[in-house]
Amino acid sequence: MNTKEKDLQYIMHTYGRYDVALKSGKGAVAYDENGKRYIDVSSGIGVNSLGYCDEGWINAVTKQAGTIQHMSNYFYSAQASDLAEKLCKLTGLAKVCFGNSGAEANECAIKIARKYSFDKYGAGRNEIITLQNSFHGRTVTTLSATGQEVFHNYFFPFTEGFQYVEADNIEALKSAVGEKTCAVMLEVVQGEGGVNILDKSYVQSVAKLCYEKDILLIIDEVQTGAGRTGKLFAHEHYGVKPDLMTAAKGLGGGLPIGVCLCGEKLKDVMSPSTHGTTFGANPVVCAGANYVLDTIANETFLNAVEEKGRYLEEKLLSLDGVKGVRRLGLMVGIEIDGDAHDTAVKCVENGLLIITAKDVLRMLPPLTITTDELDEAVCILEKTLKEN
Ligand SMILES: *Cc1c(COP(=O)(O)O)cnc(C)c1O
């Protein structure tokens, strides 16, 4: 059996895959098992932030794998404490809780928000307001948090205590807030929901409302974090400070990590045995994330992300068949005339690894992509759109 046949036989069918078996990669270029070359503007859904097989990242990770590959959370780990210190100093937040995925990081944020409220106000003040079109993960609780009806199916009963309001509508939020509200959770740019960039004044009004009522503001930066939008974290574009922030995808540079950070007010909410995960804070994973942060957390790198994004946007807007572009940094949604999914499939056949979000084509290229590679990507898209 070849890779595809074996996959279809033995792996549960939870993904509709492209008809490609990837084998290797370097930077923004990937190769399949037949040696065919692809430009990758998806970077494993924003995970390979430094591209495939960055030399420095490989060194950091392999060195740590050959030193100590895992220890339980009952021991202190320099890689984890270094990473936590960096994250806190870079965000102005106070403490970190480690996990292994975006969904887990969001579960952690939800638990902290509810416990804070329970400790301070007693039982019952536990509702969390999220936005329509949001995406917060695939566990039963984060599906509940996700404001899209399509996700609220089959797996009943879902976790109670979530309410959904229209994005960019502060009046809708004001009328949804009640005695039982303990938190508001949002992505400042909705990724899976179609690359919807929230209004700055809306997000600031949400933060103000939360602050006045001691409602916690949870910002899900699982997709927008780690330099993706041209700031280290996307909420910096908005001039707000979250009480809780989660990050995952691009933070590890290709290894599974999820972090939940909290501000000063929440730093002692969690106590021993209130939360944990065996693999969380794994030293190899943390070594990868330390390397990613050391590489991206500076003006020069982050400004280049925005510059490349602007360059890409201009090129895309000049193409026939492109109706519009929604973009922050290198997080890009492309409105096209034809069907986004069909177009993405054809792009892949033509050598461009691209994904979709709702009805837009979505690009999340490695932050290290070159302008030549962006040119090549746009060229393949142009050719594909002509075939439509
Ligand atoms: C991908 C994503 C998640 C879920 O992350 P996993 O690592 O797949 O669990 C949560 N929130 C946002 C905004 C995401 O983009």
Image (cartoon, helix red, strand yellow):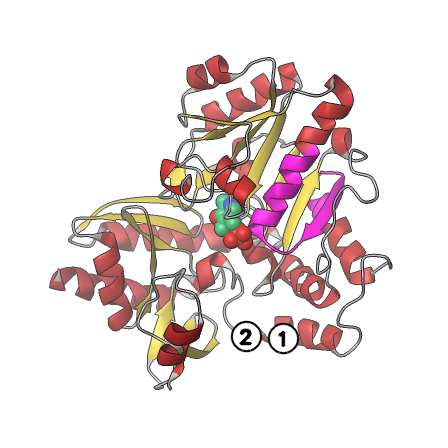
Mark 2 residue element: loop
Residue holding disc 1:
58
Please name the residue shown 19% across and 52% down the image: 339
The reply, left or right, for residue 261 in relation to residue 78 is left
Which image quadrant: the N terminus? bottom left
Q: Which residue type does callout 1 highlight?
A: Ile
Q: Nearer the viewer, residue 77 or 276?
A: 276
Give the Cα distance between marks 1 and 2: 6 Å
Residue 350 position in % (x across, y down): 24, 72
Residue 198 position in % (x across, y down): 43, 32
At label 2, counting other C-alpha atoms closer than 10 Å, the crowd grade (few under 14, some 14-19, many 20 or more) is some
Question: Is 275 above or below relative to 210?
Answer: below
The reply, left or right, for residue 32 in relation to residue 84 is left
Residue holding disc 2:
53
Q: Are marks 1 and 2 in contact (CB under 8 Å)?
A: yes
- Magenta portion: prevailing SS class: helix
Sooner in the amino-acid sequence: mark 1 or mark 2 = 2
Q: Nearer the viewer, residue 306 or 91?
A: 91
Residue 100 position in % (x across, y down): 63, 56
Question: Is 365 above or below relative to 235?
Answer: below
User: How many numbered markers are drawn?
Assistant: 2
Please name the residue shown 27% across and 53% down the image: 316
Please name the residue shown 25% across and 56% down the image: 341
Mark 1 residue element: helix
The residue stretch that appears in magenta:
87-112
Q: Kindly indicate the quadrant of the structure image that contains residue 61.
A: bottom right
